[in-house]
Amino acid sequence: MAFGLRWAATRVFLATEIRVQLHEWLAIAMGTLTPGALLIFVAVLAPGLLPVTLIGALVYSMFLIGQRVLNEAAYIRIDHKLNELYHASPLSPEGYFVGIAGGMLIAYLPPSLFILAVLEILHPLSFLAIVTLAACLLAVWAVSSTIGYVVSTLFKDMKTIWPYSALLTNLLGVLPPVFYPFSRVPMEWRSLVLVLPTSAAAVLVNAAAGLEEVTATQGVLAAVALTVEATALFAFGIYWARRTARER
Amino acid sequence: MIVATDAALRSQPQRGRVFPAWAFIGWRWVWRSPAAAVVPLLQPFFFLYFLSMITDPRLFPLQVAGAMLFSTQNIGSWCLADSAVFRIELRLQDIFVASPHDKLRYLFGVAFSNLIPALPAILLLGVILEMLTPVSWVGWLVLATCILTIWILYAAIGIAVSSRLRSQREIWPVGNLIFTLLGILSPLYYPISFLPPVWREFARILPATYAALLVQGALGFAAASTEDLGLDAGLLVLSTVVGLIVAWSLYRWRES
């Protein structure tokens, strides 16, 4: 199939997905609850860490989009069997994957913009920090949507999905230094957390915003790891979407 | 007129089988999906790890006791999800409505089946608490009573709210909204004195606040006189009774 044809229906599907998601205003609002809870804990117990936690909340919100992709893709496929209709249409499998991921990104952007506005009030960001933030959030979105989509294709029952999505968001969103400073991580774990997409993004943005100091080696390691993971995983997501377009 | 449920079938057992069956439902879920067993076990520890990174280490025993209450409170969210799936997807509630199993036993069965996956985490947290600080038998008794009270109340709230949901899609956001908010607003992970005054007053509306105050006072994490503890216990009972009445009136057993 020619490249143009392959992506022909993506725009329409993306618009459909955005519309569908915007009807789920409650789910959009609820996506802010976990970062909101952690922000409240920080505000009560360690108010000095609020700017770091707000950046963490932005990174976590992007990572949470993967969980929403997981739920949505599984819901469309398992409950509604709607993906069969989509795949029988001119919409390509990769257009379907990018449409869901992109639709989620746009629909779930308003809460992140609100957090960004609060961050700007508490700790104004430089131009470099804003560019770093945007690049890192896009990379986290690419990683998390791919993980969400791939995991969603592995299940046949909606009820068995939530523990895995909760495990992923906790392992990559709460444990590593996303909501708290990198400097509090024990020395022996620092290299590991720098290659995890969420903590790498948080460390890079914190450094660019002047909230934390990292060495050049640590900065390069985090940037390279995040770039490679985002590119490779998103490419894998497209490959996986083509491979699993039909139920086996 | 004699209907099917009135007929006494002597060849089949009529009593004592349903309760173990509910326990089996809880166990089967854990058994079929290992992650479902591991995640509830790990969830409070993820939170505790985060708190240990940002707070004074002296608060850790209080936070472990708070995690026991928080894990119990979360059972309400699982009850909400389970009873919504039973009703909306599996249409299982209709079968219970048509059976001799009444509304109250159904509610208790769902709550009991969801206590089972949470128990390992609660017990493990109890072991950690004992390792961190000596707890008297009165302290354990207060803690166990508060856990039981919170379990009954929040399971009832979860099931009552679930009966108002129309789609499985609403389970995640509604469950999150209710139980995360209730979990954050009550001072489970820190002393109530840490809260700003307005929030402190608002927290006093919630039953889990009194459970937290009672546990923190009984375990010696916060200064509390016997009168304070008695008042907290009375308010916990009162708010639980009010919560149960609201949940009972909200709950729909039959589809209209």
Image (cartoon, coloured by chain):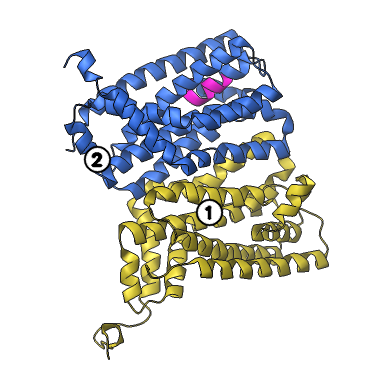
Chain colours: A blue, B yellow
**Where is A180 relative to B68, above or below?**
above
Between B136 and B32, the one lying in front of the other is B32
Res A216 quadrant in image: top right
Badge 2 element: helix
Give the percent coordinates (x, y) of residue B46.
Answer: 55, 41
Residue at x 40%, y 41% (from the top left corner) = A164
Q: Residue at x 47, y 23 (%)?
A: A197
For the C terminus of chain B, the image quarter is bottom left
Tags 1 and 2 touching, CB below 8 Å: no
Looking at the image, residue A104 sits to the left or right of residue B5; the answer is right
Q: Position of residue B82 (x, y in %)?
A: 40, 58
* Magenta: main secondary structure: helix
Q: Identify the residue under disc 2.
A: A82
Name the subunit of mark 1: B
The percent position of residue B242, horizontal first and vertical second, equals 63, 68
- In the rendered structure, find residue B74 and report the number of the disc placed on it: 1
Inspect the image, locate mark 2, and give the three-letter code of the amino acid beneath it.
Leu
Disc 1 and disc 2: Cα gap in Å?
Answer: 32 Å
Tell me the kind of residue under disc 1: Asn
Identify whether A117 is placed above or below B87. above
Look at discs 1 and 2 and give the one toward the viewer.
2
The segment highlighted magenta reads A195-203
Q: Is residue B6 visible?
A: yes
Tell me if mark 1 has few (under 14), some (14-19) or many (20+) residues whose alpha carbon lies within 10 angstroms of its own: many
Residue A116 left/right relative to A98? right
- Residue at horizontal 25 percent and vertical 19 percent from the top: A7
Residue B50 placement, left or right of A142: right
Task: Tell me what residue is drawn at x 55 percent, y 52 percent.
Answer: B178
